[in-house]
Amino acid sequence: MLRSKFQLLVDSVSMFFLITIGIFFFPVRATAESLTIRGSTTVLPIAQKAAERYMNLHPAANISISGGGSGTGIKALLDGSVDIANTSRPMKAKEVKIAQKRGITPWEYIIAKDGIAVIVHPKNPVSALTKAQLKRIYTGRIKNWAELGGFNKEIVVVSRETTSGTFECFNKIVLKKAKVTPRALLQAANATLVQTVSQTKGAIGYVGIGYLDRRVKALKIEGVYPTVETLADGTYPISRPLFMYTNGKPKGLAARFIDFILGPEGQRIVREEGFIPIK
Amino acid sequence: MFSRKTREICIEKLFLLFASTSIVILLLIAAFLFKEGLPIIEVVSPLRFLFGKSWYPTYEPPEFGILPLITGSLVVTLGAVLIAIPLGVATAIYLSEVAHPRVREVLKPAVELLAGVPSVVYGFFGLVIVAPWIQDLFELPTGLTALTASIMLGIMASPTVISISEDALSSVPLSYREASLALGTTRWHTAIRVTVPAALSGICTACILGMARAIEETMTVLMVAGGAAVIPRTFLQPVRPMTANIIAEMGEAVHGSDHYHALFAIGVVLFFVTLAINLVADFISHRFKETGSGTL
């Protein structure tokens, strides 16, 4: 009994060491064909789908992708810990300055366009708003849905974190840099924002249209409903480009992967995920 | 090969090295925290930083006032303490004084298991189950409130309170209880008038460590507290505790910017809060130390 327990202990300890050694050595062996990508949660579904397809076509390629946000992606690119940074906003002047100091040349690709849909609870009778009304809701001047012809319920303003790329776009186009009411609930990711709006009757929020689903209702803005068509022809007013950044002109797998995303197959994935192709 | 004395010295030095490693790491972390946090003083005065009422870090011009964040942390922690201490201490008394040994054998590991559940699981549970319940119960516009966060943190902090209080109660010598019972008191009387006072310093330490557990929790409050940076007037309002603010914004803050330094400065504030809590715990456990054989 004691012996077998001891045996088990020895086995598990040696297994642990083998796994640790494996983790340390495996990436080194695979560097020739591996690619790490990090950044915006908005770009994440496109990058993930594209990587899956690409790895199916080229089994030797090893692409790992994580979210974390636009700023996180750029920070990782500047630290040299990733090959590609996904962002939903252009690089900021301060970040470009840091890149120059570290000898990094950011190389920018626009891979898709994204629309920001304004969402409410499905039971909310309001189905269209203007940009001016949105601004007054988000700055806290309109406080009840009754003021907009809806039910008599307090408006629960839900926003993305003020550091996110999605917020930045919404801020520029809708709020024109006015301050969001401090009473707004701030959500760290698109998915949790949809969850919150779906379980709050009086809520209003905004997400990249790739995250729209049946649990919430998208509103017409300035009379236009957000669809791939209205975004492509520019009639829907809240949209922005999505980026991938590399350090210098990409080479090897990074170059081939970006070519794949910009090519017909990749742009089809962009459309499938609910974003707007750039070509 | 070596003399016994040399070996003895070598081993002693080795252990000294191990022991000092953790202190060195702690000092390095503190030094890093201060190095990254202090530059914010050049942008806002410490008073404006601590007592400013608006937190708009990404606007032009930015506003770095963390009073809403501090009060958010305090309100949520207060609520958690109000839940965790009665629940925890009562459970500990039951486990050590009343429970049948077999019941205890099941309950104690169960409580310890509760401490091992990842905080993101608590957060998800709070978001999907507790928040809608609070929303319906109080007919609120949103269920993501300080109260929701307090309930979750109260549950999370109670294992800490329970295990430490229980240890303190069980280390009260049997002779105290026997003496009391021999005088003809009931078990309830013995527990409340003899055992608990004898273990009081340990129980206080348990409560304060439970409080520290609540104030430092990050993931759960990020998910259920709502995240609105306003100074709360009631428990039924969304709040934005300091820890949630740091984790929500650190990923996106531009490295080396004022915002980045401000987030580290919030870390410094949290550091002092935790330090104060620990000092108070230390003080209490010395001050109320039982001088007999019943010391924890």
Image (spheres, coloured by chain):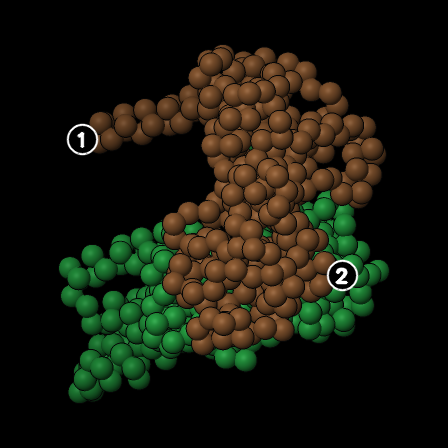
Chain colours: A brown, B green
- If the image is split into quadrants, where does the C terminus of chain B sit? bottom left
Point out residue B58 in the picture as x, y percentages from the top left corner: 71, 56
Q: Which residue is mark 2?
A: B62
Residue type at numbered disc 2: Pro
Point out residue A277 in the picture as x, y percentages from the top left corner: 58, 31
Nearer to us of marks 1 and 2 is: 2
Q: Which residue is mark 1?
A: A1
Task: Please name the residue shown 49% across and 13% down the image.
Answer: A58
Q: Secondary structure at mark 1?
A: loop
- If the image is split into quadrants, where does the N terminus of chain B sit? top right
Check the residue under mark 2 and report the chain it is in. Answer: B
Query: Could you classify mark 2 by the number of other residues whose Cα lies within 10 Å: few (under 14), some (14-19), or many (20 or more)?
Result: some
Q: Is residue A194 above or below residue B237?
A: above
Point out residue B68 in the picture as x, y percentages from the top left corner: 62, 71
Point out residue A168 in the picture as x, y percentages from the top left corner: 67, 51
Query: Could you classify mark 1 by the number of other residues whose Cα lies within 10 Å: few (under 14), some (14-19), or many (20 or more)?
Result: few
